[in-house]
Image (spheres, rainbow, N blue to C red):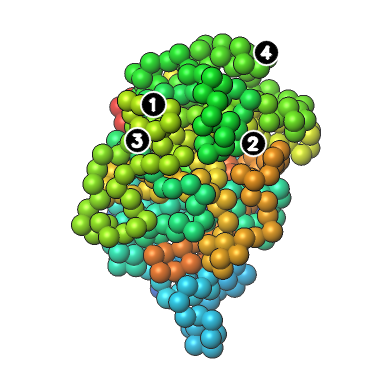
């Protein structure tokens, strides 16, 4: 029974509707409710077995609930069942497929069943808001907590190294049946899809959220698609540093959150950002829809983020892994920009990433918001067209520019889609809250189309998590991200 899920590095719980869920959006979702009565391996956890939930004595079940500021919420009971990340998208993969298909050996996107594991997840019985009307069935938690999917897979020996990477692209269209939108790698990363060498930033959080430390931010006058673009490396007079000190840049932490569509910066950056934007463009910055020609888009500034590098040496398990380098160099490093900090990580966010095209209105909406009262959130549009590696044991986050081409990863042949780093004026179509995408899923020895499909673009600001009853009173919470007792940081409450 395939279930589609949002890939979320900002939470650690996986959940989707089960057959007891009433009015839970089955007509909107890509797949039917999970029918636990049809599964011989389904196991409803009792109070003594709760991993994440809180015991409900009347039913002797483990309850999990979550609320969101825009009105969405869900309730679930905790269960276990056998799952695999891979296989066909339209039907389950059987052992007969493995026995009869000569192409199952080695790297192949169809043999996910060989990597099945016991998944602890929430069987949703009640959902509201966007969880009802989105295409994805549910959510897949990938933060650094013990209930995250990558952690469960590692603990059961499916992957050797507790590392994963996300590489998001954005295609011109999406369908209910699924659209390629990048790759996921479990157990390492594949460099054959990288356009620049992999460099690592320090992950300053030991558990929960993944957080980086910013040193500087710039606006590049005239724009550029990549940090390796000659206009970035050879025209430093076009590079304008944002007049914001480090303490303000990093106020209340800066997290990398794949479950948040857009990028949200601390409101203390608003005035200097607006002033510099107007100086370079002659226009006021706002999040209002804009009518723009492609040549006008190319002239908008590119944001550059200069990030503290990782100083951690890889552990013995990773020392011989060529995909996990020790030092930072190349276009994604600051070696050409900052002589005092040459190994800093440099990430470009071009207009085609922070502008979202609405095909209904034929207008573009800037998706960088400068209104946060707490920490900043670098969302999926910041991550876009980068292979972002979450190296858990070494407390670092890697970045390499990439087309995120799943076809190239699996078969060594580029897909027919345009590489956004090669095409000028690539149009990013709006996905909003209703865009369904399927991503390739990869383990250290497996490249797989998803058994879980993966939903990426969703604009949802999460604020409340409760392992007991779902919290309805969120009036005192000022930050927009989810608060999990395992993830919570004081400055986010």
SS at circle 1: loop
| Figure check: 405 above or below 277 | below
Separation of disc 1 and disc 3 at Cα?
Answer: 9 Å
Separation of disc 3 and disc 2 at Cα?
Answer: 27 Å
Separation of disc 1 and disc 2 at Cα?
Answer: 26 Å
Q: Earlier in the sequence, mark 4 or mark 3?
A: 4
In the picture of the structure, the residue carrying the numbered disc 2 is 352
Image position of 416 (left or right of 151): right
Measured from the top left, where is residue 216 in percent x and y? 41, 23
In the picture of the structure, the residue carrying the numbered disc 1 is 338
Q: In front: mark 1 or mark 4?
A: 1
Separation of disc 4 and disc 3 at Cα?
Answer: 34 Å
Please tell me the numbered disc located at residue 288.
none
Q: In front: mark 4 or mark 3?
A: 3
| Figure check: 46 above or below 474 | below
In the picture of the structure, the residue carrying the numbered disc 3 is 343
SS at circle 3: loop
Report whether residue 330 is seen: yes
Q: Earlier in the sequence, mark 1 or mark 4?
A: 4
Q: Earlier in the sequence, mark 1 or mark 3?
A: 1
Report whether residue 479 is seen: no
Q: At x 55% / y 25%, what residue is drawn?
A: 235
For the residues labelled 2 and 4, say whether their Cβ atoms are less than 8 Å apart.
no
Q: In front: mark 1 or mark 2?
A: 1
Q: At x 59% / y 67%, what residue is drawn?
A: 89
In the picture of the structure, the residue carrying the numbered disc 4 is 282
Looking at the picture, tell me which residue is in the foreground, 120 or 280. 280
């Amino acid at each position: 029974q395939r279930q589609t899920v949002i890939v979320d590095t900002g939470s650690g719980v996986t959940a989707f509707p089960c057959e007891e869920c009433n009015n839970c959006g089955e007509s909107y979702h890509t797949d039917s409710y999970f029918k636990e009565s049809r599964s011989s391996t389904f196991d409803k956890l009792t109070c003594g077995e709760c991993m994440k939930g809180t015991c409900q004595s009347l039913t002797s079940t483990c309850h999990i609930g979550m609320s969101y500021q825009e009105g969405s919420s869900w309730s679930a009971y905790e269960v276990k069942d056998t799952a695999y990340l891979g296989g066909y998208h339209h039907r389950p993969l059987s052992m007969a497929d493995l026995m009869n298909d000569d192409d199952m050996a080695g790297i192949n996107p169809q043999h996910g069943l060989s990597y099945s594991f016991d998944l602890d997840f929430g069987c949703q019985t009640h959902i509201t808001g966007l969880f009802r009307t989105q295409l994805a069935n549910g959510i897949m938690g990938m933060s650094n907590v013990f209930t995250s999917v990558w952690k469960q897979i590692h603990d059961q020996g499916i992957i050797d190294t507790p590392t994963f990477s996300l590489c998001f692209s954005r295609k011109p269209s999406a369908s209910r049946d699924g659209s390629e939108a990048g790759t996921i790698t479990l157990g390492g990363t594949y460099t054959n899809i990288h356009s620049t060498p992999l460099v690592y930033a320090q992950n300053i959080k030991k558990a929960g959220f993944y957080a980086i430390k910013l040193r500087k931010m710039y606006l590049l006058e005239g724009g550029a698609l990549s940090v390796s673009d000659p206009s970035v490396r050879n025209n430093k007079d076009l590079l304008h540093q944002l007049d914001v000190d480090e303490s303000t840049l990093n106020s209340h932490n800066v997290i990398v959150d794949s479950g948040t569509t857009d990028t949200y910066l601390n409101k203390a950056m608003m005035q200097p950002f607006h002033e510099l934007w107007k100086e370079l463009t002659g226009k006021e910055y706002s999040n209002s829809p804009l009518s723009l020609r492609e040549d006008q888009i190319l002239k908008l500034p590119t944001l550059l983020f200069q990030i503290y590098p990782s100083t951690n040496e890889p552990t013995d398990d990773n020392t011989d892994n060529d995909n996990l380098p020790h030092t930072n160099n190349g276009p994604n490093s600051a070696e050409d920009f900052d002589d005092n900090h040459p190994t800093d990580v440099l990430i470009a966010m071009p207009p085609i990433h922070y502008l979202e095209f609405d095909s209904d209105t034929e207008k573009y909406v800037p998706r960088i918001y400068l209104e946060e009262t707490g920490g900043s959130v670098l969302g999926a549009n910041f991550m876009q067209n980068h292979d972002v590696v979450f190296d858990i044991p070494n407390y670092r986050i890697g970045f390499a520019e990439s087309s995120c081409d799943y076809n190239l990863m699996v078969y060594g042949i580029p897909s027919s889609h345009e590489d956004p780093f090669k095409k000028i004026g690539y149009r990013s179509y709006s996905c909003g809250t209703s865009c369904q995408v399927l991503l390739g899923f990869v383990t250290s020895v497996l490249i797989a189309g998803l058994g879980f499909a993966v939903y990426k673009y969703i604009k949802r600001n999460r604020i409340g998590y409760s392992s007991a009853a779902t919290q309805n009173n969120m009036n005192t919470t000022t930050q927009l991200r989810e608060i999990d007792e395992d993830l919570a940081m004081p400055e986010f409450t």
